[in-house]
Amino acid sequence: MVSSPGIGHLSPALFLGQRLVTGHNVRVTILIVNTTNTSETQSQLISTYTADTNISVIEIPAADISSIVAPDAKVVTRLCVMMRETIPTIRTAISSMDPRPDVLMGDIFANESWAIAEELKIPKYVFVTGNAWFTGLFAYSPVLDKKVVGQYVDLSELVEIPGCKPVRPEELTDPMLDRDDEAYRVYLDQAVGMTLTDGILINTWEHLEPQTLDALRNNEILRSLINDKPVYSVGPINKKYEPVSSKNEVIEWLDKQPERSVIYVSFGSGGTIPAEQMKELAWGLEMSQQRFVWVVRPPSGQSSDGAFLKPGPDSRGPNDSGPPDYFPEGFLTRTQKVGFVVPSWAPQVEILSHTSVAGFLTHCGWNSTLESITSGVPMIAWPLYAEQFMNATMLVEDLKVAVRPEVMPTKKVVEREEIERMVRSLVEGEEGKTMTNNVRRLKASAEEAMSMNGSSYISTCRFIQDCWSRVNLAKKQ
């Protein structure tokens, strides 16, 4: 399995690998392309899953792309070029494996590696770490490219996807928001690359997205775009809560709080917000008079994904010499009895699984979304980049397990009064109780899907059977 850089893609690759090894007796090797900015969190994650399972991990240094890509290029462009330029090293690593792999799997950034599978005459599969709705848009993007004139964001009507819920133009994935940027062409190449595989695994389950999964399997237009390849719903693929003997400091703090009384705030491994927004968020949390845990990174400049390829920790914690200047004056002192500020990283699954947590203010990355759903925790949707705007819409409008600001946080600063209202609604209001009931039902459906004879377990079994059929066929040719 080939994984591109970043926790957002590595985590589900490791979790899927673990599931294949422990639940289906499959031998798994994961090739991880590392940047020079690989975080300590990523290293710990790799060590944990290497030690606890029979997964083999090969870490590959990413190619230096500083002379190829402009320093201000979009993350999508940098990731794709990085993966492309690292292909010779990936090829060498795979060719030297003994025994050789029977199947090659990669995420959507690994499509350049399909050529290696063809050279070795082995099947190739793509693992989409997002949801089915994103996958439908992704597959249909090359058609939209020919149909739509001008910028998508200038459209006055919804963007239609055959058989799926349409998308508001402003909620399309980042690369589609500017057709003149190089990232848009890179994104289209990725979409075509997905259709060249022998099958598509998606990190979702049947009960969560029945309409979209049906469209990917049965809609004539989408079927033709993915070349009639099978679609496997194998999710939720995410970290599970496991009690530990030694407790993190934030967990000890949560132990002392009343049940369902704390808002957890985190923008994921790559998300950052501007300084002005950080101050408004701090004021909103304080004004709500609710308990909170806030994972804080220094504010961003112009980019909401500023930490994606630079996830190094914030070296200064809230108790170091003087408070960070991006908080309102006196904020930490005034909130010290009700708030817990964590620099850079916190044990998210352990926090979400804690009985004192009432809600999650999240950037709506799919990993975080699944962790919240499988913990039974409703959300405040605060999308920042990638397909997070679509995820937020799904959570609010379709699943009804989240609230969100009236205007996208990337378009306008969300003011403290609105933040206060959303936090109070989630913790104290009837709306929060309703969303909690809804998300607990989704949690139950996720557990059922992953159980023996559940839909995702069966889909994973079907994937493995299809793999061996293709492997045996290839060996006979």
Image (spheres, helix red, strand yellow):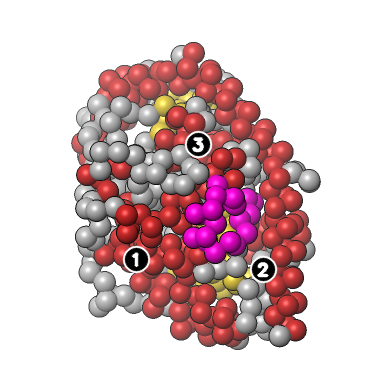
For discs 2 and 3, the disc positioned in front in the rendered view: 2
Q: Which residue has dot 1 on it?
A: 186
- Asked if the stretch drawn in magenta spans residue 309, the answer is no
Is 32 located above or below residue 15 in the figure?
below
First in sequence: mark 1 vs mark 2: 2
**Is 114 situated left or right of 244 in this image?**
left
| Res 136 visible | yes
Asked if the residue under mark 3 is in contact with the one under mark 1, i.e. CB atoms within 8 Å, the reply is no
The local secondary structure at tag 1 comes to helix
Q: How many labels does the image show?
A: 3
Magenta part of the chain: 215-234
Horizontal and vertical percent for residue 187?
36, 61
Estimate the spatial distance between the alpha carbons at disc 2 and disc 3, rounded to whole Å: 34 Å
Left-right relation of 94 to 362: right
On-image quarter of the C terminus: bottom right
Between 393 and 301, the one nearer to me in the picture? 393
Q: Residue at label 3?
A: 250
At label 1, the amino acid type is Val
Residue type (three-letter) at the residue carrying disc 2: Val
The residue depicted at 46 percent of the width and 57 percent of the height is 139
Magenta stretch contains residue 231: yes
Residue 28 image position (x, y, % from top left) = 67, 68
User: Is residue 405 depicted above or below 451 in this figure?
Assistant: above
Rendering coords of residue 214 (x, y %): 59, 45
At numbered mark 3, what does the secondary structure look like: helix, strand or loop? helix
Q: Distance between the residues labelled 1 and 2?
A: 29 Å
- Specify few, some or many for label 1: CA neighbours under 10 Å numbering under 14, 14-19, or 20 or more: some
**Mark 2 Cα shell of 10 Å, populated few (<14), some (14-19), many (≥20):** many
In three-dimensional space, the C-alpha distance between marks 1 and 3, rounded to whole angstroms, equals 41 Å
- Which is nearer the N-term, disc 2 or disc 3? 2
Residue topped by disc 2: 28
